[in-house]
Image (cartoon, helix red, strand yellow):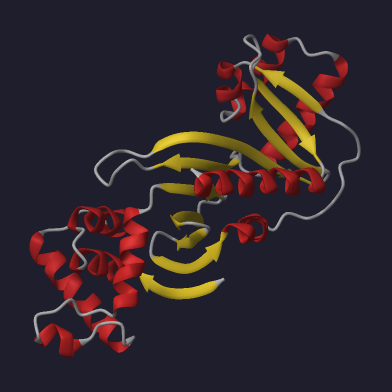
Amino acid sequence: MEYIITCTAEELALMVTVCGYPGVAKGIAEASLGEKTPQEWEAIMGTAARQLILKQVWDSEKERRDEVPFSEEAQQFIREYVESKWMIRCVHQTGANILMIHHVGQDKWMSHVIDQDMFHEFSYINEEEIPEIIRSYYSFSDAPSEKSASFQLTDKMFDLLSKPDKTEKVRKKNRFAPEEEQSFDHFITDLEKNSWLLMNISFFNIPSMEADPILENIVFFLPSDAGIWIVEYTEDRKTPVHIELNTHEEWCGLLNGVGTVAAMVNQG
């Protein structure tokens, strides 16, 4: 891992603007600060410029020569970040921070942690580091699962699990076998402990800066005292959503699979 920079959303937006991507910068800034008047943005960007000068990122001498006031390395970092075509996005159920991993060329990737929609930390990494970085981000315990536990749901029933008052409806509609019902109860207990929110890892293709990212794949999961629940979509037409309690080793295997997908992007 090669550390690049830690900056505020305002500082990042200013860097992206100055490097020629004002549309992208607008999205970064508004995600953190909301909509502002042109006068407010001018004041905010002025403060950001002063902060970048203090961090020795903004070169005032280059600015006086009417040049881009950043080093070649800083400009390259911005280009690679903005023009990345593939991204792995890891979401924690608290929503306090998000880990994004951008593909920036060959086996070169960029780790990007966003904290509270305000602070951005960037580092260069290679594809072999991806599974460990994701594993560290979630920090799940390595408690082994006590026994196998699994059940299946329809898409509609799975969507209802985000609503605590709908769990009994899901139970009745699915007519679980005894072991499946025990698994369902275990899952619901863990879901309640995690505020009825699942975590997920998603994989996006970004055709262009103007186009919306295309979701290529997504995996949902949930930590448990007895392992980690993995939610996957199968080709079963009636009940395609398969929910199974995995061991920590199996979870790590899933992350290795994410690393394999990353390698396929490089080959493509």
- Residue 24 lies, with reference to residue 43, above or below; the image says above
- Say whether residue 4 is left or right of residue 73: right
Residue 206 or 107: which is nearer the viewer?
107
Establish if 68 lies above or below 38: below
- Front-most of 260 and 152? 260
Residue 30 placement (x, y as % from top left): 26, 55
What residue sits 15% from the left and 65% below the top? 41
Q: Quadrant of residue 104?
A: bottom left
Examine the image and state in which quarter residue 44 appears.
bottom left
Viewer can see residue 107: yes
The residue at the point 25 percent across, 79 percent down is: 70
Q: Quadrant of the N terminus?
A: bottom right
Q: Position of residue 23 (x, y in %)?
A: 20, 53
Q: How many marks?
A: 0
The x, y position of residue 178, in whole percent, is 87, 16
Asked if residue 42 is positioned above or below residue 184 in the image, the reply reads below
Q: Residue at x 46, y 61 (%)?
A: 112
In screen coordinates, is 36 left or right of 221?
left
Residue under the point 56% across and 48% down:
262
Residue, far right: 146
Image spot of residue 37 (x, y percent): 11, 58
Q: Can you see residue 93?
A: no
Above or below — where is 11 with respect to 152? below
Residue 191 lies left or right of residue 48; in this view the side is right
Give the quarter of the image for residue 254: top right
